[in-house]
């Protein structure tokens, strides 16, 4: 991990704290955009080129545009008045750390049980270019790939069903589309 | 190897920040964004371990997580929108009733 990726990692952590700490949801959303872009940079530094690009396009592009669209649509006020108490913050931190601690022993066992010689010789073969990821996706994971497209289809239909207004008038008004009969 | 361990540590830090946000914040959209951040932390760990092991299975897993996250964000924001239509608020503490 060189200096640049260390700085990118610090950017990710600081912007992540900003997502949680900022009062206005709009500022949180912009901090999350910075966070997602920083994680995309980390992917690039880990030789996962395809994932870095699709992180920028899918997460920082599509999903965050959707989140910002809903935020603007709802016209929210920031969480004012009620300050976050110290006890509440401490409890949340303890809960979060406990979640991670539960995953820590297998990870450490994994690292301690692994000799460094077996790692270094196959280090070079894992460059995640579009070609390599595409070959994996369309040979080894083709069933899961098709299933993912089905999940996306169900997601689209479900989103339309949930967000649809119940009693919207679809019939055109007698005055036509312009409607303003004087 | 220590480099990969640094990435895994960074992923843990991001996951804790996301989990703290889910516990702390009341705005449902911010909670949603914190969940996205936790997913990203796990993705970072996947990519780091993929680099460590020298195969691409972890990166394919990240691709599928991205697909599921896209579908989940569409559904989740639609749910938040319809909750807002019912109770005029997206605060998680206000959505206390089970039936409208």
Image: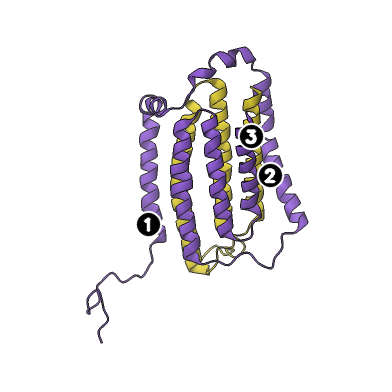
Chain colours: A purple, B yellow
Is A47 in front, or is A168?
A47
Q: Are marks 2 and 1 on the same chain?
A: yes
> In this picture, is B69 found above or below A47?
below
- Marks 1 and 3: in contact by CB < 8 Å? no
Residues at discs 2 and 1 in contact (Cβ within 8 Å): no
Mark 3 residue element: helix
Dot label at residue A160? 1
Please rate how many residues cluster around mark 3, counting C-alpha atoms within 10 Å: few if below 14, some from 14 to 19, many from 20: some
Residue located at (66% from left, 43% from top): B16
For residue A96, which numbered disc appears in the image? 2
User: Which corner quadrant holds the N terminus of chain A?
Assistant: top right
Q: Quadrant of residue A109?
A: top right
Compared across the picture, whether A62 is left or right of A119 comes to left
- Distance, label 3 to label 1, CA atoms, is 42 Å
- Crowd tier of the residue under label 2, counting other residues whose Cα lies within 10 Å: few below 14, some 14–19, many 20 or above: many
Asked if one can make out residue B68 in the rendered structure from this viewpoint, the answer is no
Q: In whole angstroms, how far apart are the C-alphas of marks 2 and 1?
A: 34 Å
Q: Residue at x 49, y 55 (%)?
A: A67
Mark 3 vs mark 1, foreground winner is: 3
Image coords of residue B75 (percent x, y): 45, 52
Q: Which residue is mark 3?
A: A6
* Chain hosting mark 3: A
Up the image or down, A87 lies above or below B39; here it is below
């Amino acid at each position: 991990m060189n200096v640049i990726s260390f700085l990118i990692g610090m950017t990710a952590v600081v912007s992540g704290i900003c997502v949680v700490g900022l009062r206005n949801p709009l500022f949180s959303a912009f901090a999350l955009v910075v966070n997602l872009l920083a994680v995309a940079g980390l992917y690039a530094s880990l030789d996962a080129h395809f994932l870095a690009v699709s992180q920028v396009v899918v997460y920082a592009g599509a999903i965050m545009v959707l989140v910002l669209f809903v935020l603007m649509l709802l016209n929210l006020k920031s969480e004012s008045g009620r300050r976050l108490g110290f006890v509440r913050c401490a409890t949340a931190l303890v809960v979060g750390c406990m979640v991670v601690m539960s995953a820590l022993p297998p990870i450490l066992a994994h690292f301690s049980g692994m000799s460094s010689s077996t790692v270094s010789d196959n280090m070079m073969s894992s460059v995640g270019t579009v070609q390599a990821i595409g070959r994996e996706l369309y040979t080894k994971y083709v069933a899961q790939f098709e299933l993912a497209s089905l999940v996306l289809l169900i997601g689209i239909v479900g989103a339309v069903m949930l967000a649809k207004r119940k009693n919207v008038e679809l019939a055109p008004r007698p005055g036509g589309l312009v409607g303003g009969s004087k | 190897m220590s480099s990969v361990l640094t990435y895994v540590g960074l992923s843990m830090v991001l996951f804790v920040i996301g989990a703290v946000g889910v516990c702390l914040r009341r705005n449902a959209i911010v909670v949603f964004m914190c969940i996205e951040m936790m997913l990203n932390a796990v993705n970072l760990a996947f990519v780091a371990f993929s680099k460590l092991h020298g195969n691409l299975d972890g990166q394919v897993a990240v691709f599928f997580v991205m697909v599921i996250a896209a579908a989940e964000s569409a559904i989740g924001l639609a749910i938040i929108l319809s909750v807002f239509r019912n109770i005029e608020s997206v605060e998680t503490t206000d959505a206390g009733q089970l039936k409208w």
